[in-house]
Image (cartoon, coloured by chain):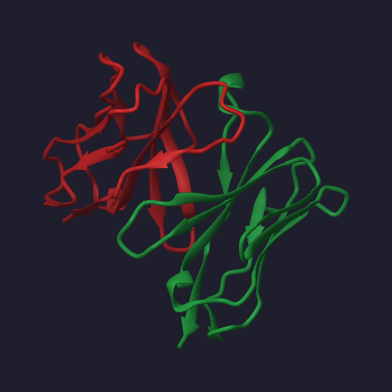
Chain colours: A green, B red
Amino acid sequence: QKEVEQDPGPLSVPEGAIVSLNCTYSNSAFQYFMWYRQYSRKGPELLMYTYSSGNKEDGRFTAQVDKSSKYISLFIRDSQPSDSATYLCAMSESYTGANSKLTFGKGITLSVRP
Amino acid sequence: EAQVTQNPRYLITVTGKKLTVTCSQNMNHEYMSWYRQDPGLGLRQIYYSMNVEVTDKGDVPEGYKVSRKEKRNFPLILESPSPNQTSLYFCASTFLGQSNEKLFFGSGTQLSVL
């Protein structure tokens, strides 16, 4: 089993839809969970960050972590065409100061149709 | 403007011809890293550096070299490129010990080795 698994996609939804993006992982030592967004021909940029279990909300975006199930999700409400991008989950055992490696999922490409 | 700058954006070369991809950041970050991104494989870390003169291997270091002589620069060197190194390369940087794991990525270098 790969360390981080992400739904391969691609995913196409109509504007205004609620989008759910998911990742599962096998390493129970992961404590830091992130979602990066990557627009075409650009580098990834941090979208959401969560430490340990729980929910975190930022505008239309909600990140959810369930450590007992080793499952993380990103929800996008009222999706917009500008949300069309590739979304990558990432996770680590500790922060970079502790020499911890960041492990990425393969990414899922989302297209929001006007 | 805070940024990570990679050059060149696109590069086509032939097998065995040494090349260097440059990376520079203007945010005084201690930590810098190189990734390659391939379809179906996601982002994989090549090398990283915790500070000047401190570098270490990531997941896929074979065929690559790096150096960190100055804090702002972290060049990626391919001494004898091969076709399996055709990929999209990203440089990234961040502060050490930062709890939000915000990696700043460059815009990428698309390398084709013929």
Q: Position of residue B41 (x, y in %)?
A: 49, 57
- The outermost residue toward the front is A59
Instruction: Determine whether, in the image, residue A44 is placed left or right of residue A40.
Output: right
Residue A79 visible to an observer of this rendering: yes
Q: Residue at x 62, y 28 (%)?
A: A95
Quadrant of the image for the C terminus of chain A? bottom left
Q: Position of residue B64 (x, y in %)?
A: 31, 33
Q: Position of residue B24 (x, y in %)?
A: 25, 31
Q: Residue at x 56, y 26 (%)?
A: B98
- The outermost residue toward the right is A68
Instruction: Determine whether, in the image, residue B80 is placed left or right of residue B31.
Output: left
Q: How many marks?
A: 0
Quadrant of the image for the N terminus of chain A? bottom right
Against A37, is B57 above or below? above
Against A50, is B78 above or below? above
Q: Residue at x 57, y 33 (%)?
A: A101
Q: Nearer the viewer, residue B15 or A42?
A: A42
Residue A106 visible to an observer of this rendering: no
Q: Nearer the viewer, residue B57 or A54?
A: A54
Against B32, is B90 above or below? below
Q: Position of residue B25 (x, y in %)?
A: 29, 30
Q: Nearer the viewer, residue A102 or A59?
A: A59
